[in-house]
Image (cartoon, rainbow, N blue to C red):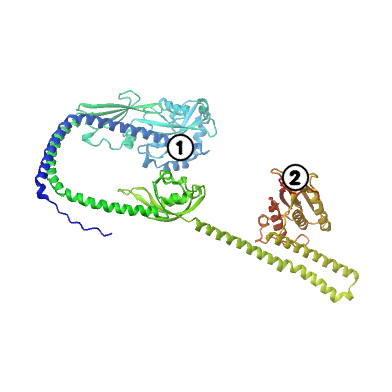
């Protein structure tokens, strides 16, 4: 869009007199206001100073209170470290304190330590254990006849003044002991009264205080005072040198000489030299010869322990404000004359400003209209989020694509609409946007439609920043990729099916090429032998060859039967006619069918099936399942072994059938691949009987068609158990077959 060229004409000559009177009136008003302001400033400055003084004092009080609670939270974390572990080593404590970064976050703390309770009869053992850690001079101090001792065993940083506290029994000193007992009995962070720390030397002597948090034995109940006293094993604590602590908390807040406020902190309610904990101007001479103008006393109460904060300000510090009133008056007069000239210029340019503003407003409205039209007609969702992920704006495309009204989305967190499994990727995406400060694209996630379904979207976003560069949110777009996602998933699914079909095809042709060829070659070899040597063969030789030909034909028939069953199953040609029948009536014929093969290997085959146990299954499929599993058991069992068929009802209206043998067993890897078509697991039996591995695949397909499952348990050299479950009774439907015996 080309910006219009504007030409302005200003009829200044016609309004110059009027503009001059306006400027003069403003000058007079400015002088009057300046004089009034100076007058009222002088009158009200004292009230303002009082309010400012009170505000500063209350802010300091809040800062001290907040810091004490922060220290308490740190000690709670240390106590939790002991609660979460049976043993906290000296190295572990050192690492915990270093990771807490106290020097960076909580300035002024002398240290953080752990004091353990020691019964008198364990004192020497405790001293010996610490000395074995490399502290040959360690002892508990002061040493005297007491029933219970405590000993500081950890204190970080473990250097400088803190070395003087190593082994100190704080429980032996009444003031410290009172705070330790309060922490123990009420499970709180307790603050001690005024003490002189054992860390003190003759250099820079300061008043001190300590904070304690109890550590209870893991697993012990702490619901009552008695239980807490029984469970206590020590305290996590911090010693404070009060000058260092307050300097760490407040810094140089009173360094401005013209505005200095003196802070004195007293233990409890007593305002005396004996209870003085801290004086911000103890080495200064500011108050030595000055009258005190203002005094404010504020209490800080921390878990029952009270500190009294006394704030003072001298009268001399306020004298310079009287001179400021004159400065304000003179400055106001000067500013009024400057404004007089400035306003003349502003009046002249007023007409131009109005005309330019009108033109810019028109252009802005036109631009906003185009932007609004673009947003409303976009097929992508346009949105803005707060840094916490709350929607500030969503375009109407949200309603068109997802059904939620726009006014119900704004003000809601985006997590409410995104699938829980996709939230980590979204959070990582927004962190990347902030980290790079650039537009990021390509995070895929699901968004819930108003009907409860999930739609796939891909989002892009850029960070929103204020004038200072601080991130105040995100602006982005989201595009529906559901159809493409479904298409890709369908392609992947088809690829997986093709891989499985290829594996099955390879297995199928492998069986045809190898397992069918072997019995055919044997059969053809015997027929050729008979054709070429029949006149010379004796009757017993012919009988032996015929028996071998029969066995080859039987093997060939069994293999073809398995292939036919599998082929019919894959093409969906197998009929499925489940009937309820007595399980034993289906087991007995299979045992008789397999008995000849078992007798040849002197294998005892039996069953332990309850006579009245019912099962519901397709009779032909059941016969094929059991026949394959029992034949396999006989095939892989050595001579004189055993094969037993078990059955029992299991919860859920099912029957579990087990075939157990004493055969050669299987490895874990073989068990994992038994029912896979794409992995070759077949092997010969104990007498060289051939195997294709196809029978187990058929069993699995037939069993799953009944809604059951099959699994194997085995150990090499110790036999195998094949278990499968089938329904014991199907829900009767009109026309369902009745219970039958077979």
Quadrant of the snapshot with the N terminus? bottom left
Q: Is label 2 in a helix, a strand or a loop?
A: strand
Residue 12 in the image: above or below residue 28: below
User: Residue at the spot x=31%, y=24% of the render?
Assistant: 271
User: Residue at the spot x=61%, y=60% of the render?
Assistant: 497
Mark 2 or 1, closer to the camera: 2
User: Residue at the spot x=28%, y=52% of the render?
Assistant: 364
Q: In which quarter of the view is residue 40 placed?
A: top left
Q: Residues within 10 Å of mark 2 (few under 14, many from 20)?
A: some
Give the image location of residue 336, x and y in percent. Answer: 13, 40
Give the image location of residue 583, x and y in percent. Answer: 78, 48
Give the image location of residue 718, x and y in percent. Answer: 73, 52
| Cα distance between the residues tagged 2 and 1 | 57 Å
The residue beneath circle 1 is: 78
Residue 362 in the image: above or below residue 24: below
Relative placement, left or right, of 731 versus 484 is right
Residue 334 in the image: above or below residue 499: above
Relative placement, left or right, of 339 versus 741 is left
Q: Is label 1 in a helix, a strand or a loop?
A: helix
Is residue 319 something one can see in this rendering? Answer: no
């Amino acid at each position: 869009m080309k910006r219009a060229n504007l030409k302005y004409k200003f009829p200044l000559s016609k309004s110059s007199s009027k503009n001059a009177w306006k400027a003069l009136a403003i000058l007079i008003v400015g002088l009057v206001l300046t004089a009034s302001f100076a007058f009222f400033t002088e009158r009200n400055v004292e009230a303002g100073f009082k309010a400012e003084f009170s505000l500063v004092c209350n802010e300091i009080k809040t800062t001290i209170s907040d810091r004490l609670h922060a220290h308490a939270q740190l000690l709670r974390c240390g106590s939790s470290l002991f609660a979460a572990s049976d043993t906290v080593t000296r190295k572990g404590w050192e690492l915990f304190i270093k990771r807490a970064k106290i020097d960076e976050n909580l300035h002024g703390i002398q240290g953080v330590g752990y004091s353990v309770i020691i019964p008198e009869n364990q004192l020497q053992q405790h001293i010996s254990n610490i000395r074995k850690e490399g502290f040959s001079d360690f002892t508990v101090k002061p040493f005297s006849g007491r029933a219970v001792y405590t000993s500081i065993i950890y204190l970080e940083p473990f250097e400088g003044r803190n070395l003087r506290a190593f082994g100190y029994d704080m429980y032996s000193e009444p003031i410290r002991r009172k705070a330790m007992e309060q922490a123990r009995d009420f499970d709180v962070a307790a603050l001690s009264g005024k003490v002189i720390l054992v860390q003190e030397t003759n250099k820079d002597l300061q008043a001190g205080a300590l904070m304690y948090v109890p550590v209870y034995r893991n697993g012990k109940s702490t619901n009552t005072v008695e239980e807490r006293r029984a469970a206590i094993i020590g305290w996590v604590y911090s010693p404070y040198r009060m000058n260092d602590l307050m300097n760490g908390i407040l810094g140089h807040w009173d360094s401005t000489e013209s505005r200095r406020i003196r802070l004195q902190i007293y233990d409890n309610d007593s305002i005396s030299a004996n209870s003085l904990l801290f004086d911000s101007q103890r080495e200064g001479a500011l108050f030595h010869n000055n009258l005190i103008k203002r005094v404010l006393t504020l209490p800080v109460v921390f878990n029952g322990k009270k500190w009294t904060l006394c704030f003072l300000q001298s009268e001399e510090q306020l004298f310079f404000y009287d001179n400021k009133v004159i400065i304000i008056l003179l400055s106001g007069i000067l500013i009024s004359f400057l404004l007089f000239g400035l306003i003349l210029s502003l009046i002249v340019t007023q007409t131009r400003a109005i005309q330019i503003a009108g033109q810019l407003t028109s252009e802005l409205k036109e631009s906003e209209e185009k932007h609004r039209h673009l947003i409303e007609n976009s097929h992508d969702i346009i949105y803005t989020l707060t840094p916490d992920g709350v929607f500030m704006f969503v375009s109407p495309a949200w309603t068109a694509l997802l059904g939620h009204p726009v006014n119900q989305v704004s003000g809601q967190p985006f997590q409410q609409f995104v699938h829980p499994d996709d939230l980590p990727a979204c959070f990582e995406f927004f962190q990347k946007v902030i980290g790079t400060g650039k537009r990021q694209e390509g995070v895929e996630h699901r968004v819930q439609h108003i009907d409860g379904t999930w739609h796939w979207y891909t989002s892009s976003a850029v960070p929103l920043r204020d004038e200072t560069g601080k991130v105040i949110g995100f602006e982005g777009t989201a595009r529906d990729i559901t159809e493409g996602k479904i298409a890709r998933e369908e392609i992947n699914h088809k690829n997986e099916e093709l891989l499985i079909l290829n594996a099955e095809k390879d297995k199928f042709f492998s069986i045809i090429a190898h397992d069918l060829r072997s019995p055919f070659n044997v059969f053809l070899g015997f027929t050729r032998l008979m054709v070429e040597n029949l006149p010379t063969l004796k009757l017993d030789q012919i009988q032996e060859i015929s028996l071998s030909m029969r066995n080859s034909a039987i093997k060939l028939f069994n293999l073809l039967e398995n292939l036919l069953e599998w082929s019919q199953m894959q093409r969906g040609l197998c009929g499925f006619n489940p009937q309820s029948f007595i399980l034993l009536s289906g087991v007995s014929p299979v045992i008789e069918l397999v008995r000849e093969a078992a007798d040849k290997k002197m294998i005892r085959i039996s069953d332990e099936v309850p006579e009245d146990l019912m099962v519901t299954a397709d009779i032909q499929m059941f016969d094929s399942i059991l026949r394959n599993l029992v034949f396999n058991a006989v095939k892989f069992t050595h001579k004189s072994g055993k094969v037993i068929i078990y059955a029992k009802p299991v919860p859920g209206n099912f029957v579990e059938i087990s075939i157990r043998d004493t055969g050669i067993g299987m490895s874990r890897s073989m068990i994992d691949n038994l029912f896979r078509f794409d992995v070759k697991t077949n092997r010969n039996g104990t007498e060289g009987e051939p195997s294709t591995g196809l029978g187990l695949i058929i069993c699995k397909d037939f069993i799953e068609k009944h809604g059951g499952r099959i699994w194997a348990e085995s150990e090499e050299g110790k036999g195998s158990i094949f278990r499968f479950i089938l329904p014991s009774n199907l829900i009767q439907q009109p026309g369902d077959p009745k219970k039958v015996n077979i």
